[in-house]
Image (cartoon, rainbow, N blue to C red):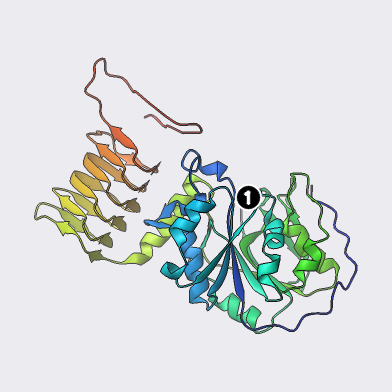
Amino acid sequence: MTSLVRVPAPILPREPRVRALKGLVLAGGKGSRLRPLTATGAKQLVPVANKPVLFYALEQLAAAGVTEVGIITGDTGPQVEAAVGDGSVCGVRVTFLPQPAPLGLAHAIVTARDWLGAAPFCMVLGDNFLKRGIGPFVDGFAAGEGDAQILLKRVPNPSAFGVAVLDPDGRVRRLVEKPAEPISDLAVVGVYFFGPEIHAVTATLAPSARGELEVTDAIQGLIDAGYDVRATVIDDDWVDTGKKDDMLEANRLVLGTLGRRIGGEVDAGSTIVGEVMVEAGARITGSTVRGPAIIGAGARLADAYVGPFTAIGANCRLSGCEIEHSIVLEGGVIRAVETRITDSLIGRDVVVERSPLKPKAIRLMLGDHSVVDIA
């Protein structure tokens, strides 16, 4: 169920469009679907191809000419601030905007109201990934196309998303957050464009049944008030990296674009096949790496096999093991494991090894919300 929004039309005369857009990136939230990885860390900092997924959003804004960026933070704000710094690592200038609680995407706009001022802006969810970026959409909105714009993608499971219903001319007619009954297969992608008119709508919203100020309600308020809300159905690869399999899919997409570069040491007894990046300080001995794959700085591989679509983080240690289609975060250790590891997301400083102890048995120490598949 979505909250009822009644807004008089029109709310305000349309503000003259300022060409320069600001960026608003959401990096709060609990990340419950990625626990235990996110039990003590920000979900937006989980790496894809050895780079925090949040950095892709910031870099895509910079590439589109949006360099003034506000980042909404929550409980993990200090971690996000430490990772992003002043934003120069991603080509942007950053202002951190703490949100007192994860009260919804529209509440993030309320939180940023003073910082945004009268500027039009692009709001991006920091755990979403668009392979080809957002440049054309930024250009179109900056040129004055509509009062708001959303991106849509056809999905097989619309009940997991906010969805849009379009009129015959392709204009947005209705939005519903996670509908129980499928009214459309057009999911709202986590990239939104708004003018300053949105602030008058967010001020009128009431919390939905799940206790949040929904961005779908805010957009519906613009529509009800007679504003021109436009939509583009994209054919780009889009991943909402909220779950393990989503992270692996984003990792697969990025690794396929990296190319080949050997910056570390590879001995004569090793074989590197295809598009593989070996970062500076990594050392590979007696091993095979088949790309696309990335081996992080300072990692050590000995008598190991790393298969396609695998990201091995910085300072990992792999020996006597095989792994593919997986992500291993910084400091992970895998040694003397006879069964090939696949489709896995292994956290920082995690140790996976064969035990010499008798009797032979599986011995586990796992955090809350862990998942283990045993062959």
Q: Nearer the viewer, residue 101 or 60?
A: 101
Res 153 visible: no
Q: Nearer the viewer, residue 21 or 339?
A: 21
Res 95 visible: yes
Picture layout, residue 145 above or below residue 35? below
- Seen in the image, is 168 located left or right of residue 371? right
Amino acid carrying label 1: it is Asn
Residue at the left extreme, as displayed: 268
- Seen in the image, is 284 located left or right of residue 49? left
> Residue 76, percent across and down?
53, 49
Residue with the mark numbered 1: 157
Q: Nearer the viewer, residue 277 or 204?
A: 204
* Residue drawn at x 36%, y 60% as measured from the top left: 255
Picture layout, residue 210 above or below residue 67? above
> Residue 106, percent across and down?
71, 58
* Residue drawn at x 67%, y 83% as measured from the top left: 18
Viewport quadrant of the C terminus: top left
How many C-alpha atoms fall within 10 Å of the one at disc 1: few (<14), some, or many (≥20)? few
Picture layout, residue 346 above or below residue 218? above
Where is residue 172, by image quadrant? bottom right
Where is residue 204, by image quadrant? bottom right
> Residue 149, percent across and down?
69, 71
Residue at the right extreme, as displayed: 8
Number of marks drawn: 1
> Residue 343, percent across and down?
39, 43
SS for tag 1? Answer: loop
Picture layout, residue 218 above or below residue 10? above
